[in-house]
Image: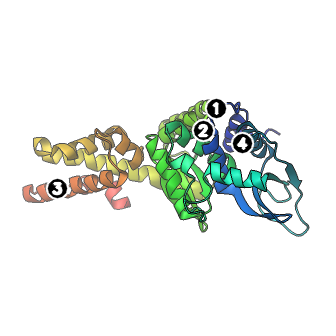
Amino acid sequence: MTRGFQPTEQVIGELSRLPAVLPRCCLLAEIGAALRICGTVGLRSGQTAVEADFAGYPQAARLRTAITTVFGYRPPLQVVLPAGGRKRGKDAGAPRYLLVAGTGRDAEHLILSAGLTGPAGQPLAGMPRPVVAGRRCDCAAGWRGAFLAAGTLFSPQRARPLLTVACPSRETALALDGTARRMGIAAHLRKYRGTCHAAVAGPDGITRLLDAIGSPGTAREWLARWEACQARTAADPGAVPAGLGQLDGSNLTRSRQAADKSAMRARRALEILGRDTPGYLQQVAQLRIDHPYAELGRLGMMADPPLSKDTIAGRLRRLNAVADARAAELGIPGTEEALPGLAAAS
């Protein structure tokens, strides 16, 4: 029985096969981000040691190759078999891969070069300096290392496409989000089960990020599958995509209903206001109408000049409020009243 399309595994496979011959600055950003996400600094045989724990061999081997290329030594890689006892989850019973990235003077040089501590040697709160203070290529390399350490690309059949990296702290997630924005990609902080994630949502942002970090093949396949899913949905709006449970199907239905309602309210607002529609509200209304299922962050990136998702949301609320006030003056249905069925369903 085939496993089908496994997006996270495909991204990891594509990234781990990239030649580690990039500029030194990019490799340092990749190394620093990976170690910040899944690495620890401690003592090993009385010496300073940097270790990184990975769920898969390709990720650990990629980091080992990058360290060898930059620093000239080959770190040992150990397979850690699961301890006895009952384990839960999809990775129950699976081995872990522990990379001893450096010990002694090698560890100290690695820590300093990869920016794993602050200027005064204090523990790092966000992301290493080679990532946050580098060029766009360094930002992409940082995301590559972070994804290899703890990234997930969710199925294109989800109602809300999502790519996330689990981070050890809120500051780390916010710093990683900032590097995405420097590449022109909208990212946000997402909390799930007490863990902070750096997240990129929507097909446009996800595929652009995958292209930037070195996984264009998976980006194309993922986007093709997402578009096929959208085409099936357009042909049969009531259908739930294959692979989604009942709860996901209900969320998808509510999401589509809300998107349809938002676009129809924007269209009705323009009908009410006509030529009196302020230009800045006209723009967001037209974006909402032309792209009813696009997320607010993506609409903001389409705007000229680009706007934040909060600004888009605020202007849509302002548009509806102004249109409803005008409709009340004229004694005609407003943006809600003119939507029989949708208004009642809400």
Q: Nearer the viewer, residue 301 or 43?
A: 43
Can residue 54 be seen from the camera position used here? no
Mark 4 is surrounded, within 10 Å at the Cα level, by few (under 14), some (14 to 19) or many (20 or more) other residues, namely some
Residue identifier under label 3: 322
Q: Position of residue 237 (x, y in %)?
A: 48, 43
Distance between the alpha carbons at the discs numbered 1 and 4: 23 Å
**Residue type of the residue flagged with mark 3:** Val
Q: Which residue position is annotated with label 2?
A: 26
Marks 1 and 3: which is nearer the front? 1
Task: Residue type at mark 2: give it.
Answer: Cys
Q: Quadrant of residue 330?
A: bottom left
* Nearer to the camera, 120 or 331: 120
Question: Can you give x and y, in whole percent of width and height, for residue 125 in the image?
Answer: 56, 63
Give the CA separation, mark 2 to mark 3.
50 Å
1 or 3: tag closer to the N-terminus: 1
Reading the chain from its start, which is encountered first: label 4 or label 3? 4
Residue under the image location 66 percent in, 50 percent down: 34
